[in-house]
Image (cartoon, rainbow, N blue to C red):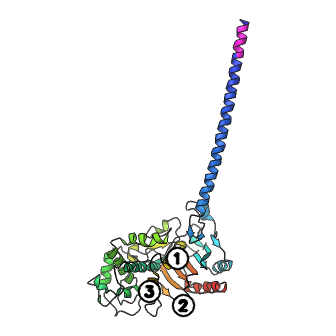
């Protein structure tokens, strides 16, 4: 019996040793698996990080952008994206500019960053991917669309507008070219804050008649509202569908869209201020009724997308070089061609809306670009004057 008892204890002892060995083996295996998973996860995150860093690009220049959901990135004050030209950076910092800019010298981005607050209440800074209402600079896209339709044989610039709208006032004498160059002589329409359809806008323009015969410069949104409606008529697409397919996609616009009353709720949107409000209270400039800015100011962008549009336009991706020269040929002493002013220093267009001031210009040799998006309406700061100073700085460094 004693012998049997001894065998039973020995058997139990052996079982315990086996169990301990099995447990240790399992522990080692699980540790190895966990280490491998950690290594693979870290390698994957590095690959994703590298992909995010190079995702946004302008031509051959890669632009690092804060991720949209990264709250820490949004809270960093005036963190530069690209600052290769410190004299330009100092110029903006010391001249009270509020907004975001891209400056290109010899086809290389030398400055891309934000200055000041996008939202004074939240103390949220303008960054390289802040969104701005672009106002009348949208007209360049409408002019491009008309020239695209011309190249497809859908219209001729010297067609009378009566060919497409038989009841248009003085319609046999007003050419499409007159609408593009703001020399149509129409009275236009007054903007209000009530919602309007494109058809209602067109009816008002037709009902208001003319103020003079064609040929005299008179800048009116109404000219381009008519042209926007013509794009729809001849393309059989809505204006937004046409612009997305024929302008946004070939230009690779990544942060461009159509504005409505919810614009200020967008994560990266800048708020528009007037000078007396800036840093004294949180009141913003009143938004317009965007339905009344059909084709002439119902769009938002960031500066990088404006530069992409300029690149696509000048490189022949949107219209031919021949029609590009037509676009830049002034139709009057105002220097305004079709969507752009052809000034001695720059080919430039401008937009002003609800506290936003936009200037988009490039040199005649298409090597230098000056894109200024400001969210403060300040009578003491002229974007035209800033363009002159910046251009002089760039010329001194060529």
Crowding near pointer 1: few (<14 within 10 Å), some, many (20+)? many
- Answer whether residue 326 is magenta in the image: no
Query: What residue would you read off at disc 2?
Result: 344
Mark 3 / mark 2, whichever is N-terminal = 3
Q: In the image, residue 31 lies at what x, y percent?
A: 67, 39
Compared to 121, does 381 lie above or below? below
Query: What residue would you read off at disc 1?
Result: 311
Crowding near pointer 3: few (<14 within 10 Å), some, many (20+)? some
Residue 141 seen in render: yes
Disc 1/disc 3 C-alpha distance (Å): 17 Å
Disc 3/disc 2 C-alpha distance (Å): 17 Å
Q: Nearer the viewer, residue 67 or 292?
A: 67
Find residue 373 and report its image quarter: bottom right
Find residue 380 and report its image quarter: bottom right
Q: In the image, residue 304 lies at what x, y percent?
A: 54, 72
Magenta span covers which residues? 3-10
Q: Residue furthest left?
A: 167
- Principal secondary structure, stretch drawn in magenta: helix
Q: Nearer the viewer, residue 268 or 234?
A: 234
- Answer whether residue 8 is magenta in the image: yes
Q: What is the secondary structure assignment of the residue under circle 2?
A: loop
Mark 1 / mark 3, whichever is N-terminal = 1
Crowding near pointer 2: few (<14 within 10 Å), some, many (20+)? few
Relative placement, left or right, of 320 versus 153 is right
**Quadrant in which the N terminus is drawn:** top right
Query: What residue would you read off at disc 3?
Result: 326
* Residue at position x 63%, y 79% in the image: 92
**Quadrant in which the C terminus is drawn:** bottom right
* Residue mark closest to the camera, 3 vs 2: 3
Q: What is the secondary structure assignment of the residue under circle 1?
A: helix
């Amino acid at each position: 019996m004693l012998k049997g008892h001894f065998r039973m204890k020995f058997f139990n002892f052996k079982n315990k040793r086996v169990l301990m060995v099995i447990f240790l083996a399992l522990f080692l295996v699980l540790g190895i698996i966990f280490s491998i998973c950690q290594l693979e996860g870290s390698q994957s995150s590095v690959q994703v990080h590298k992909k995010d860093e190079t995702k946004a690009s302008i031509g051959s220049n890669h632009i690092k952008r804060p991720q949209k959901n990264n709250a820490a990135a949004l809270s960093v004050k005036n963190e530069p994206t690209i600052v290769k030209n410190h004299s330009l950076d100092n110029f903006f910092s010391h001249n009270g500019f509020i907004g975001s800019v891209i400056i290109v010298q010899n086809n290389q981005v030398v400055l891309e960053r934000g200055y000041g607050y996008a939202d004074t209440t939240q103390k949220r800074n303008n960054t390289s991917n802040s969104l701005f209402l672009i106002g009348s600079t949208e007209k360049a896209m409408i002019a491009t669309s008309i020239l695209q339709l011309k190249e497809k044989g859908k219209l001729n610039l010297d067609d009378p507008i009566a060919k497409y709208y038989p009841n248009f006032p003085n319609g046999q004498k007003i050419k499409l070219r007159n609408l593009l160059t703001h020399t149509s002589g129409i009275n236009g329409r007054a903007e209000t804050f009530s919602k309007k359809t494109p058809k209602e806008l067109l009816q008002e323009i037709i009902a208001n008649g003319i103020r003079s015969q064609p040929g005299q410069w008179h800048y009116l949104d109404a000219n381009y509202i008519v042209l926007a409606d013509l794009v729809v008529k001849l393309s059989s697409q809505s204006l937004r569908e046409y612009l997305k397919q024929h302008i946004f996609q070939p230009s690779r616009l990544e942060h461009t869209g159509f504005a409505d009353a919810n614009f200020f709720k967008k994560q990266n949107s800048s708020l528009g201020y007037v000078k007396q409000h800036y840093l004294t209270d949180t009141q913003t400039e009143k938004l317009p009724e965007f339905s009344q800015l059909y084709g002439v100011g119902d769009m938002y962008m960031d500066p990088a997308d404006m530069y992409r549009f300029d690149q696509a336009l000048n490189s022949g991706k949107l219209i031919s070089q021949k029609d590009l020269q037509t676009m830049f040929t002034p139709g009057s002493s105002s220097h305004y061609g079709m969507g752009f002013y052809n000034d001695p220093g720059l080919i430039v267009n401008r937009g002003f809306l609800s506290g936003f001031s936009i200037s988009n210009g490039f040199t005649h040799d298409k090597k230098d670009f000056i894109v200024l998006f400001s969210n403060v309406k300040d009578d003491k700061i002229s974007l035209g004057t800033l363009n002159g100073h910046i251009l002089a700085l760039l010329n001194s460094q060529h």
